[in-house]
Image (cartoon, grey):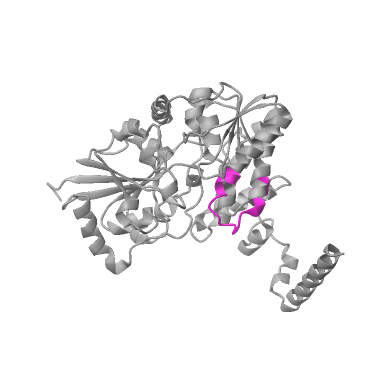
Amino acid sequence: MTGRSLTRIFLVSTLYGAATLAAALDSDAFAPADRRLLLVCNNATTPETAPAVDTMPGFDRLRGRFDRVLSWNETISPFHPGGWSPRPDDVPLWERYLRLLWGLGDDRVELVVESIQVNPALAVSQLFPDAPIDVYADGLMSYGPTRNKLDPLVGTRIGRLLHLDLVPGLTPLLLTEFGVKAHTVPTAAFTKVLTELGQASGELDVPEGGALLLGQYLSALGILTPQEEEDLHVRMVRGAVTRGHREVVFKPHPSAPARWSRLLEREAEKLDVTLTVLEQPVLAEVLYERMRPALVVGCFSTALLTASAFYGLPTARTGTGLLLERLTPYQNSNRMPVTIVDALVPDIGDADGGARRAAAPPTGLVQAVGYAMQHQIHPGLRPAAERYLTAHLDQYTWRYFKRRRLTALGLPGAIPSQLSFLPRNAAVRRVARRARAVQRRLKKRAAFG
């Protein structure tokens, strides 16, 4: 290998992720390389209608940290980045093609990717089968277990998990099944990059202070219906007004329909408050820099934790209880972010209780939920899960677990042992099915008068 040049390829799909990489580079988290290539991927459902990372305001400030910017979408066109992966027999052909297309020659290649469990990161990792891999995390999912079982041919090549210290004192579970060590990207380096982005974002017509509401477009994930998500945003406005705020800024998700903004405008008019709907595609953290909001309200956005941990801003949440009920299956990778936000961020209607819960990192809760989500990947977490459930399962913490899940895993809180035969008893199951059928018929009759 001596004498061969080293090319490090950084895969990025969000401006937040690009800022994380820039902060890692600025803090010397990577050894020197002969070339740094930024591989941009647009994972939007319809990439043609959504801005790519390298077209967003402020990206030019990050561009200089890389020698060249490449497009993964163009490379695999007309396939979608989220749905394409190479056939195993085609990997050698694809690797030769990419080395020719990107001018890699016989360089040694190292990869830095996000969301390694899914495409496009998994596909890129498979196309360079000899490349060492670092994974960086740009959100709360890093504290949860790996979404699904990762191919050892990929997992054993991962050296580090780089992550932001969103919950001080809490260690990520992601990729620990492969012994991957977590490396924290310094907060000061990250906020410095965000300041650069803020300076390059142009004029933002937003009031200083006031309340900032963060939209997430959860109906696109099938978690909420569009009507439920509209109601969620309305509750954010009402909650901010209840807290005494008369100026409200709503930052919609880039893919959210425009009708939501109009609904909020009508609600704001009814409540006699000033509402500003932000149209520019900027990071929430840029708004923290520019408007210094007096309150940040969201559902389970990572930006709620950056607001409190990095900027010391007051935060509030709403809707997490409903999401904890709705997320299916229990292994849904959004469960850990929702759990952490619910545990650490006060509800919009109950600031005191939330502030008290946020006093310590929820390590035991994260371990228990992580084991319940992926017990086969993390069998070593069972003792910690049992300890937590035995000591802390109460009226409030039940929201993070499902009795059926605890029963299936034989954990504290499961159906009592003397009744454990019921789910396996065929006669009982038949009776239960008949009872449910009768209930459904009665409900239908009642509905139709």
Residue 122 relative to residue 326: left or right: left
Quadrant of image for the C terminus: bottom right
* Location of residue 101 in the rendering, given as x and y in whole percent from the top left corner: 21, 53
Quadrant in which residue 412 is drawn: bottom right
Residue 370, compared with residue 27, is above or below; it is below
Tell me which residue sits at (64%, 46%) in the image: 229
Residue 335 relative to residue 413: left or right: left
Residue 135 forms part of the magenta stretch? no
Tell me which residue sits at (59%, 54%) in the image: 222
Could you say which is closer to the camera, residue 94 or residue 259? 259
Residue 286, compared with residue 148, is above or below; it is above
Residue 335 forms part of the magenta stretch? yes
Residue 58, can we see it? yes
Instruction: Residue lying at the far right in this picture: please name it.
Output: 449
Residue 392, can we see it? no
* Location of residue 357 in the rendering, given as x and y in whole percent from the top left corner: 65, 35
The boundaries of the magenta stretch are 319-340
Instruction: Residue lying at the far bottom in this picture: please name it.
Output: 427
* Location of residue 231 in the rendering, given as x and y in whole percent from the top left corner: 68, 43
Tell me which residue sits at (56%, 37%) in the image: 361
Counting every numbered tag in the picture gives 0
Instruction: Residue lying at the far top in this picture: please name it.
Output: 208
